[in-house]
Amino acid sequence: MIRFDFDPTVAPFGLSIRLETLALSGVILMVLVLIALRAGRPPVTDVAAAAVLRDTARDTAVESHGARAAGGRLRRDELILIAFGVIPGAVVGGRLSYILIHLDYYNANPGALVDPSQGGLGLALAVALGILSGLAVARLLDAPIERWLHLAGVPVLLGLGFGKLTLLLGGVGQGRYSNSSLATSYVGSGPWGSLNPDFPALPSQAIEGILVLLVAAGVMLVPLLLRLRLRRWRRVARPGWSPRREWSMLNGSTGFATVIALWIVARFVAAFTWRDAHVLGPLNAEQIVLLVFLVAVVVSPSLPADVRKVRAHWSAWRAARAAAAKAGRGPVGSIGG
């Protein structure tokens, strides 16, 4: 097995800071920088129209929402505000997720529900409610949400993958006890973040991090491989690239939903290595939460279109009803009438 023997804390300026906290802060900074760098580039589609819109907005000294939504450069100060907006939802969701995973304990100790010094945070609902609170802030800012979601997909996936790997520095997230050659144990004085850290166990945190990073690599590489073409040049097959395009499954809110759905699947698979008790067949509480989350994510891209259809249908029915009443034919009996 793999043994870790090091001090998980450092003390700069006399302050004790855990290594995984520093590493996780670096991962969050990396995610924000990647999104900010991508925000400086115009989208691939309709670049000429985007340039015209940008020039028009610059000439009038007013950057309209339509220009930004169609292809103008995004305002990076919005990114900071949206990132701060993610925090309250992530904290509340993380606490709710942790409570659901350890529901038996909190049923017996209800006073510990609001005690921040007891327990911790779960990840599934932290991601779910963090996304919702971030979207709420973006809506308040009248930001082009579709474009921000498109830019955030891959960086968020990288952040979730590297974030799990940072837990190795604190011994957090050790899985089931195992005699496998890949099992890890922490033999230093710690303090470590798992129960019985010196017992060899499956490194669930590393397994999940690697799975998520493999998903991220696939999301980045598959569009490139789909562009690869073999062209005949005289008698030789020469590799080449087809024109770059945006794939519908990886674009806008649908692309972000695809990325989050793939992350859920990776975490669901890694959760089979956890120590948590089974609550429904072979599934633990976190896996059940992930299944519910997955259903919500799969449905979410179609919700705006469905809502627009319902509103349009309702408006048409009300207009037909008003026209019929004005013509003296009486009320319309049904939406179809």
Image (cartoon, rainbow, N blue to C red):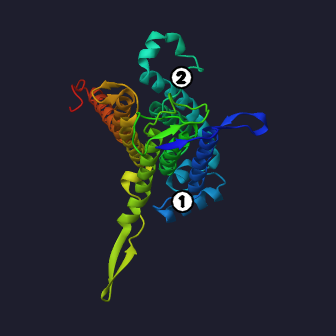
Q: Is residue 30 left or right of residue 224?
A: right
Marks 2 and 1, how far apart at CA: 44 Å
**Measured from the top left, where is residue 148 in percent x and y?**
52, 47
Image position of 87 with respect to 114: above or below: below
Q: Residue at x 45, y 48 (%)?
A: 210
Q: Quadrant of the C terminus?
A: top left
State the residue position of label 2: 119
- In the foreground, 91 or 75: 91
The amino acid type found where label 2 is placed reads: Gly
Name which residue type carries label 1: Pro
Q: Earlier in the sequence, mark 2 or mark 1?
A: 1
Say what secondary structure mark 1 lies in: loop
Secondary structure under the numbered disc 2 in the rendered image: loop
Where is mark 1, residue-wise? Answer: 42
| Identity of the residue furthest to the bottom in this view | 234
Q: Residue 177, position in %: x, y?
A: 41, 33
Label 2, residues with CA under 10 Å away: few <14, some 14-19, many ≥20: few
Q: Residue at x 34, y 73 (%)?
A: 229
Task: Residue at 44% x, 55% y: name it.
Answer: 217
Q: Nearer the viewer, residue 199 or 274?
A: 199
Crowdedness near tag 1: few (<14), some (14–19) or many (≥20) residues, C-alpha within 10 Å: some
The correct choice, above or below, for 240 with respect to 128 in the image is below
